[in-house]
Image (spheres, rainbow, N blue to C red):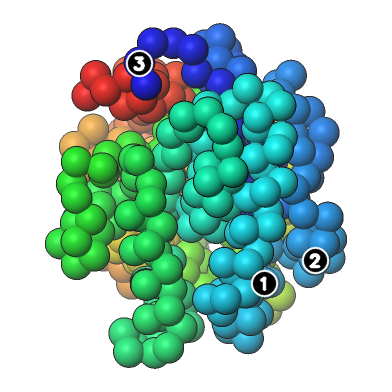
């Protein structure tokens, strides 16, 4: 399909106003619309309008389940994951929801389906089977689902859940026209281990918002912030345990945690033992969350999940905050070191604490790294640049 007559349908199980993946989807809707491409959203979670784009809830039952229990709680229960992702059950669900999507997509004139991750891809592929017009389906993957759940539940490769998800993931990949990964590590695994043709695969990192408020003054507040899910894979515990080593006799240092998740109560108890100023803000609407982070001197990415692409890295950078990242992570070298936008520290609580303390003791260096971080977003990693790359892929210009 060539030309500019694209009408985009975004299929997602996620909300549109949260953190992480939700930010990406929200910004994609906004940017496609800004560039003049109509967008229709098919969501499992909500209904209404966003950036003048219609949002259809394609599953009343799942919407109630997710809103009642919370997406994080469902995704972190092995029992619920096994129940939902049983092969026959998930394929039946995708078929039913795909029929809902196809009927609306035909009415709205959609000819591009941009599917969010595994479940969105299954639904989009089922929708295409029912559509009369020629439709391209792109799957956008924040993670390889079988490896994600293997890590989340400490499962071996031969575990039935991992095998089942791997087989369904390969089947989805085979049906997609293009596969977009936010992580080059996952893209390499898909090519080398899952035997997916490299011609289908493109790596598009996450991005930052050039309309974000920017830190205007670098008078230090002795504050480090964390923005995101309070979940096992984010390794927040390592950050909190670093506090005594970062404090080093100063009563001024503050750690801020903005976000919620299944480990929130556990992290609050851990923070009580740190004998310091660790503030938990819980989940806040995204615009409120970034305003809280704006008062910090540094933003931390404590995860040691090596395949990931932490969107918070670009959120901090868009605010003009230098990043604290862990050694051994691919983005620590390719982004943090390459653009000189932060500090790369060994992933243990003593080194993290000492590294934070040393950084805060050098306000001029923090100022310069923050300026470079924002410039990186303006020049290379913003949503308009990223969305134009997707449009270029659709035009076969890459």
Q: What numbered label is drawn on residue 307?
A: none
Compared to 275, does 101 lie above or below?
above
Would residue 141 appear left or right of 368 to someone viewing this image?
right
Are dots 1 and 2 in contact, CB under 8 Å? yes
Q: Quadrant of residue 381?
A: top left
Tag nearer the camera, 1 or 2:
2
Q: Write down the residue under mark 3.
A: 2
Chain-order first, disc 1 or disc 3: 3
Seen at 48% across and 32% down, the residue is: 135
Chain-order first, disc 2 or disc 3: 3
Tag nearer the camera, 1 or 3:
3
Say if residue 398 shows up in the picture. yes
Secondary structure under badge 1? helix
Q: What numbered label is drawn on residue 74?
A: 1
Instruction: Classify the position of the C terminus by image quarter.
Output: top left
Question: x and y percent of residue 141 in the render?
Answer: 42, 50
Seen at 50% across and 37% down, the residue is: 114
Seen at 37% across and 72% down, the residue is: 167
Compared to 389, does 139 lie above or below?
below
Tag nearer the camera, 2 or 3:
3
Secondary structure under badge 2? helix
Seen at 33% across and 54% down, the residue is: 174
Q: CA distance from mark 1 to mark 2?
A: 9 Å
Question: x and y percent of residue 29 in the render?
Answer: 59, 27
**Crowd around label 3: few <14 · some 14–19 · many ≥20 (10 Å):** few
Seen from the viewer's position, the closer of residues 217 and 342 is 342
Seen from the viewer's position, the closer of residues 98 and 204 is 98
Q: Write down the residue under mark 2.
A: 65
Q: CA distance from mark 2 to mark 3?
A: 40 Å
Question: x and y percent of residue 89 in the render?
Answer: 62, 74
Say if residue 298 shows up in the picture. no
Compared to 210, does 20 lie above or below?
below
């Amino acid at each position: 399909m060539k030309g500019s007559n694209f009408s985009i349908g975004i299929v997602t199980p996620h909300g549109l106003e949260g953190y992480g993946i939700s930010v990406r989807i929200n910004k994609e809707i906004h940017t496609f619309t800004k560039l003049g491409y109509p967008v229709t959203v098919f969501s499992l979670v909500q209904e209404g309008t966003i950036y003048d784009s219609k949002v259809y809830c394609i599953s009343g039952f799942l919407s109630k389940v997710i809103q009642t229990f919370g997406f994080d709680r469902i995704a972190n229960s092995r029992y619920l994951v096994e129940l939902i992702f049983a092969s026959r059950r998930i394929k039946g669900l995708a078929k039913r929801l795909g029929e809902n999507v196809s009927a609306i997509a035909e009415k709205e004139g959609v000819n591009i389906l941009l599917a969010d991750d595994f479940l969105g891809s299954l639904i989009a592929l089922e929708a295409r089977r029912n559509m009369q017009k020629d439709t391209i389906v792109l799957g956008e993957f924040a993670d390889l689902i079988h490896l994600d759940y293997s890590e989340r539940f400490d499962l071996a490769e031969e575990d039935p859940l991992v095998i089942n998800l791997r087989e369904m993931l390969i089947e989805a990949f085979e049906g997609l026209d293009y596969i977009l990964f936010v992580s080059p590590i996952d893209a390499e695994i898909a090519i080398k281990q899952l035997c997916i043709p490299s011609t289908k695969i493109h790596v598009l990192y996450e991005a930052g918002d050039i309309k974000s408020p920017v830190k205007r003054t670098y008078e230090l507040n002795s504050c480090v912030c964390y923005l995101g899910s309070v979940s096992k894979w984010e390794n927040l515990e390592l950050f909190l345990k670093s506090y005594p080593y970062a404090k080093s006799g100063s009563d001024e240092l503050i750690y801020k945690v903005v976000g919620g998740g299944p480990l929130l109560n556990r992290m609050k108890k851990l923070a009580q033992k740190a004998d310091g100023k660790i503030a938990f803000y819980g989940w806040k609407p995204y615009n409120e969350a970034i305003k809280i982070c704006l008062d910090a001197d540094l933003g931390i990415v404590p995860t040691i999940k090596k395949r990931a692409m932490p969107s918070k890295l670009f959120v901090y950078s868009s605010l003009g905050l230098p990043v604290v990242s862990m050694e051994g992570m691919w983005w620590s070298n390719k982004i943090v070191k390459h653009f000189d936008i932060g500090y790369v520290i060994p992933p243990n609580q003593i080194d993290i604490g000492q590294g934070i303390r040393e950084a805060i003791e050098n306000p001029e260096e923090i100022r310069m790294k923050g300026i470079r971080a924002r410039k990186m977003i303006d020049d290379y990693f913003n949503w308009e640049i990223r969305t134009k790359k997707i449009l270029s892929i659709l035009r076969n210009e890459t």
